[in-house]
Image: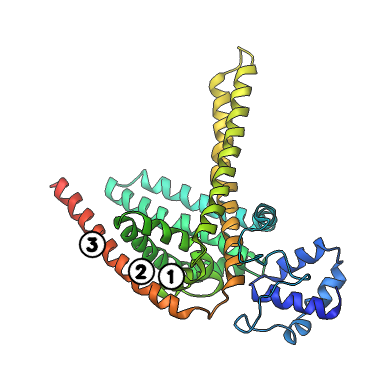
Amino acid sequence: MGDNNIHQWLQQARAKGLSDMEIKVKLKEQGWDNNQINEVISPGSLKSNVQTSQNLSYKKSDTDIEYTPRNHTIGSNIFKRTFADVKRACVPYLAFLIIGLIISVSLFFVITNVNIYIGTIISFLVIWTVFPFIGFGAVTILTSDTRDLGEIFSNTLKRLIPYLYTSFLSSLVITGGFFLFVIPGILMSLAFVSLPFVVAKENLSGFAALKRCYILARNFRGNIFGTLLMLSLFFIIIFALIFGLITLIFIITPENTSNVATWLIGFGVMFISLVTVIPIFQIAYSRIIYNDLVAIRPPGTDEEVGNKGQTLMMIYIVIGIIYFIYNIYAVFTTIE
């Protein structure tokens, strides 16, 4: 690339929210060495060339990066890009898993030594804090420029409460949408695929984050659904292969070998995959969708559409709250 082309490329990359690490990976794939990369992405090089995302034209050029959607589509080369993200994030994500495991195991021992009511409360807190902490930690890792664990933990904790609050609002919206003949709930669920990244990357929360998700997904819910369907089929194939391998091992295992042990090992592998690899892969996959949507609709666009979406979502929230209160009332009535 010439100087003008690389500067244009960097402008587009920055406007799409790509971190220094992601830019370095892309340049290395193009054959650049570390000295060349450090020179072109130095702060001095970027300051004079980066525009704000509101003023950037997203016109496709032959020097554009692969993250740019072609003809307003999303998910180009999505599995390749997702694997690259997972590879980059696996070490810090493992640290989050270990911390979450330590907290969960510690609380488990506490639960076994207290009465059932306190134990239920603690279990509820684990579900609503530790698991979201791990999941949102993965989001922070993927959207952060730093690989410093201390800074990643700090940023995760800083944005965790706004994320939980916004997630709760989104669950009310989805509940209200499902109550209105299901389809609106499905459409809202597709819109909120970008929610964790809007909170972490764009520093939005509450209705502002919900509006932003609504704007991003407008006219692209079909694309999002198709892309997520591919992910589901991918997971089904992976689990089918694992299960088939377990069955094959079971068939060829000598009779004097414990079949129970064979199955336990196999399901242990599936469980480890379920709690480690699949969540980070799914989050990285969703981030690619978010990046492609942002490339089409950068921050500050279609605010009028967002305002209309907010009105609609408030209606869904009211319905969701009514439904939630009704269920609480029904539970207490049953207990009495």
Q: Which residue does the image show at 33% across and 56% down from the upper left? A: 178
Q: Earlier in the sequence, mark 1 or mark 2?
A: 1
Q: Position of residue 298 (x, y in %)?
A: 58, 76
In the image, what residue occupies the spot 69% across and 58% down?
A: 88
Residue 268 found in image quarter? top right
Outermost residue, bottom direction? Answer: 48
Q: Residue furthest left?
A: 336
Q: Dot 1: within a 10 Å radius of its alpha carbon, few (fewer than 14), some, or many (20 or more) residues? A: many
Q: Secondary structure at mark 3?
A: helix
- Location of residue 54 in the rendering, given as x and y in whole percent from the top left corner: 59, 82
Q: Which residue is rendered at x = 41% and y = 63% of the image?
A: 167
Residue 223 appears anywhere in the view: yes
Label 3: few (<14), some (14–19) or many (≥20) C-alpha neighbours in 10 Å: few
Using the numbered discs, state the Cα–Cα distance from disc 1 to disc 2 in whole angstroms.
Answer: 8 Å
Residue type at numbered disc 2? Met
Q: Nearer the viewer, mark 1 or mark 2?
A: 2
Depicted 282 relative to depicted 236: above or below:
below
Element marked by disc 2: helix
Residue where numbered disc 1 is placed: 210
User: Regarding mark 1 in the picture, which secondary structure is present there?
Assistant: helix
| Number of the label disc, if any, that sits on residue 322 | 3
Give the amino acid type for the residue marked by disc 1 in the picture. Leu
Q: Residue at x 74, y 76 (%)?
A: 10
Is 73 situated above or below 131? Answer: below
Residue flagged by tag 3: what amino acid is it?
Answer: Ile
